[in-house]
Image (cartoon, helix red, strand yellow):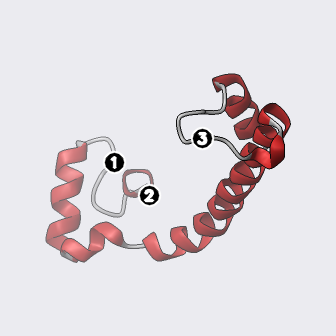
Amino acid sequence: MLSQTGEHGSASKLTPIQLFRSVIKNEGVLGLWAGNGANLLRVFPSKSIVFSSNDFFRGTLGTLYFGNNGARNENEKLPWSLSFLAGGMS
């Protein structure tokens, strides 16, 4: 992103290592995490919904596949096809 805006020098002349050094020199080590808080506020809710819905669909498909309310032994795993389907539905 910084190489696109040209904030730390000409974008065509800086390699990623030079850009890394420039950020540390100009902003300190904490400058490497600038904007990460806003990114977490954007990503965290969406990923929590995806993980929760994946667990729900895996449980539902497990109930349909194994029967008896999804109660199964620890060594009985959901087939990869159903796990893939649960991920796609979430």
How packed mark 2 is, by other alpha carbons closer than 10 Å (few <14, some 14-19, many 20 or more), is few
- Measured Cα–Cα span from mark 3 to mark 2: 55 Å
Q: Which residue is mark 1?
A: 11
As shown in the figure, which amino acid type bears the numbered disc 1? Ala
Per the rendering, the mark at residue 26 is none
Specify few, some or many for label 1: CA neighbours under 10 Å numbering under 14, 14-19, or 20 or more: some
Position in image of residue 11 (x %, y %): 34, 48
Which amino acid is tagged 2? Answer: Thr
Q: Which residue is tagged 3?
A: 73
Q: Residue sitting at 70 percent across and 39 percent down?
A: 87
| Upstream in sequence: badge 1 or badge 3 | 1
- Residue 69 is left or right of residue 12, and the answer is right
Residue at 80% from the left image edge and 32% from the top image edge:
65
**Residue 86: percent from the left, percent from the top?**
74, 38
SS state under label 3: loop
Amino acid beneath label 3 = Asn
Cα gap from disc 1 to disc 3, whole angstroms: 57 Å
Q: Identify the mark nearer the N-term, 3 or 2.
A: 2
**Residue receiving disc 2:** 5
Q: Nearer the viewer, residue 40 or 63?
A: 63
Q: Is residue 14 visible?
A: no
**Counting residues from the N terminus, which is met first, the one under dot 2 or under dot 1?**
2
- The residue lying toward the viewer, choosing from 12 and 69, is 69
Quarter occupied by residue 7: bottom left
Between residue 64 and residue 80, name the one nearer to us. 64
In this picture, residue 61 sits left or right of residue 10: right
Q: Residues within 10 Å of mark 3 (few under 14, many from 20)?
A: few
Whether residue 28 is visible here, answered yes or no, is yes
Q: Is residue 49 left or right of residue 1?
A: right
CB of mark 3 within 8 Å of CB of mark 2?
Answer: no
